[in-house]
Image (cartoon, rainbow, N blue to C red):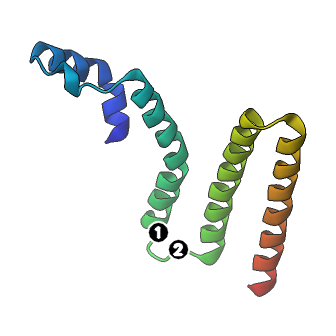
Amino acid sequence: MVERYVEKHQAVTGALCALGKAEMRVSNDEIHLLKTIINVLTPFDLVTLEMSIEKHPSLSKTLSKVRQVNGNSIKRAALVTQRSLSGGDAEKIHRSIKQRDSLRCKFSRSTI
């Protein structure tokens, strides 16, 4: 639904202005935020769709999808920290996240 609104934003804004309800329109900053939200939530939507297609999803398929989502979220978090922190601090945080993720994967493999 949010994706459709972003696609039709100009048409909706035009219709609101024509009806004299320009105060209800969504600003460009809010559209940018909506696009960011779409980018963050898209992997979860794809995983949900993939898992709901299967009548009996296997554990291996479930884990691979979870790793995909985790990998994407780690990459996004690294990009955000690199933009907001100085170079040295961002690298330390990125290494810490990667190390924690590799430990989590080793632990999950050993418990299965």
In the picture shown, does residue 46 fall above or below 6?
below
Q: Residue type at mark 1?
A: Glu
**Crowding at label 2, few (<14), some or many (≥20) Cα neighbours within 10 Å?**
few
Q: Residue type at mark 2?
A: Pro
**Crowding at label 1, few (<14), some or many (≥20) Cα neighbours within 10 Å?**
few
In the picture shown, does residue 61 fall above or below 12?
below
Q: Picture coordinates of residue 32 (x, y %)? A: 47, 28
Q: Quadrant of the N terminus?
A: top left
Judge by depth and name the residue closer to the eye, 65 or 108. Answer: 108
Please tell me whether mark 2 sits on a helix, a strand or a loop: loop
Identified at 19% across, 19% down, the residue is 22
Q: Picture coordinates of residue 93 (x, y %)? A: 82, 51
**Which residue is label 1 attached to?**
54
**Which residue is label 2 attached to?**
57
User: Left of 95 or right of it: where is 82?
Assistant: left
Q: Quadrant of the C terminus?
A: bottom right
Q: Are marks 1 and 2 in contact (CB under 8 Å)?
A: yes
Identified at 72% across, 36% down, the residue is 84
> Marks 1 and 2, how far apart in space?
5 Å
Q: Picture coordinates of residue 76 (x, y %)? A: 67, 44
Please tell me whether mark 1 sits on a helix, a strand or a loop: loop
Q: Picture coordinates of residue 19 (x, y %)? A: 9, 18
User: Left of 35 or right of it: where is 70?
Assistant: right
Identified at 50% across, 52% down, the residue is 46
Judge by depth and name the residue closer to the eye, 81 or 71. Answer: 81
